Image: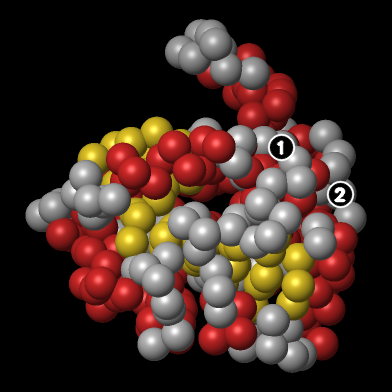
Amino acid sequence: MTDTMANGKPRIAFIGFGEAGQAIAAGLHDADAAQMTAWDILFPHAAGNNLRRAADASGVRCATSAADAVAGAETIVSAVTAASSHAAAQSVQAHLRGRPIFLDINSVSPGRKQATAKMLGSAARYIDVAVVAPIHPARHQTPMLLAGPDSRAVAPKLVALGMRASIASTEVGAAAAIKMVRSVMIKGIEALTLECFLAAARAGVIDEVAVSMRNNYPGLDWAKIVPYNLERMAVHGERRAAEMEEVAETLRELGIEPLMTNATVKRQREMAQIGQQPTVRNVLDKDRVTMLGAISTAARDRH
C-alpha cells in the first residue's frame, strides 16, 4: 500500500473470490476502506454468478483476468483453493509492478508457502498469512498471523484498514505452521463429532452421550457444538478436506506420520458429499437430532 488512488483509498486486488475473499471485501467495503478488484476463474462461467453478485454488492470490480485484477494494485489477497495457491501466484507474477504486498491467506503447508515466496521473488512483498478464526462474522477483522521478512512493515498498514494482524515471525512458513498444526485439532474434532454423534443417533443415545461428555469437558456446550460442526462440514467439507491434505503434508515435512489427519480428510470429504443432498441441506439450520437423522439416512443411502 504505497501509493493510493486520488480518493486516498488503497487499491486491493483479490485473486479468488470465494467465502474468505468475499468476507474480507465486504468488511472493507462497509468500512469504506479500499478500492477493490477481483478475479476468480469461475467469473466467466455460470458457476460464478453468485461470486459476481457478491462482488457487485461489495463494490468490487470484477476483472476480466488475473492480470487485469492486479494492474495498479498495492495489495493482492490470494484466497483460492489450497491446491491452486501456487498456480494463482504464478498467474500474476509477470504482471506485478512496484513490489505490491502479496497476502497469501491460503491454508497450505509451510513448504508450499516458501515455494510460492521463492517463485514470486522480488516481484512482490510476500506475506505468509494464517487466518486463525472463522471468517464470519468478523470478516476483515478476523485475527490473522503474518510471517515473512516484510511482515513488520506490512502489519501497521493492515491495521490501518481495521484488520487484526499480528506478527508470528519474520520467516515465511511460520504462520502456515501454526495454522496447519492447529487444524489437526480443529478439523479433527469436527470429524470426531460426526463419527461420535452419528453413532449416538443410530444407537438412540444422543442426549445421554452429550451429557456424559460434560463430565470430561465441562466448559463445552455440546448442544451448540454438534450442529455447528456438522453444518461447517456439510457446507465446507471439501475445502476442509483439501486443507487437511495440506496439514498431512505439513506433518510429513515435520517427520510425523499423519494417521489421524488422513482419517479426518476422509470424514470431511464424505460429509461434503452428504451435505450436497437436499434432505441434508434443508435441515442445516435445525437442531442436532434433526440434522443427525437426515445425515444418517443420507449416509446409509450412499452405501
The residue closer to the viewer here, 235 or 39, is: 39
Report the residue that reaches farthest toward the left: 255
Please give the label number shown on residue 137: 1
Left or right of 203 on screen, residue 92: left
Residue 23 in sight from this viewpoint: no
* Residue 182 picture location, percent across and down: 36, 39
Q: Indicate whether 269 appears above or below 47.
A: above
Left or right of 302 on screen, residue 118: left
**Residue at x 23% of width, y 64% of height:** 114
The residue closer to the viewer here, 51 or 162, is: 162
Residue 28 in sight from this viewpoint: yes
* Residue 224 picture location, percent across and down: 71, 26
How far apart, in angstroms, are the residues tagged by discs 1 and 2? 21 Å
Amino acid carrying label 1: it is: Pro
Q: Tell me the crowding category of disc 2: few under 14, some 14 to 19, or many 20 or more residues within 10 angstroms, Cα based.
A: some
**Callout 1 secondary element:** loop
Residue with the mark numbered 2: 283
Give yes or no for contact between labels 1 and 2 (Cβ–Cβ under 8 Å). no
Q: Tell me the crowding category of disc 1: few under 14, some 14 to 19, or many 20 or more residues within 10 angstroms, Cα based.
A: few
Report the residue that reaches farthest toward the front: 6
Left or right of 278 on screen, residue 139: left
* Residue 93 picture location, percent across and down: 38, 82
Name the colouring of the figure: secondary structure
**Residue at x 76% of width, y 90% of height:** 45
Amino acid carrying label 2: it is: Val
Mark sitting earlier along the chain (1/2): 1
**Residue at x 59% of width, y 67% of height:** 14
Q: Indicate whether 30 appears above or below 111.
A: above
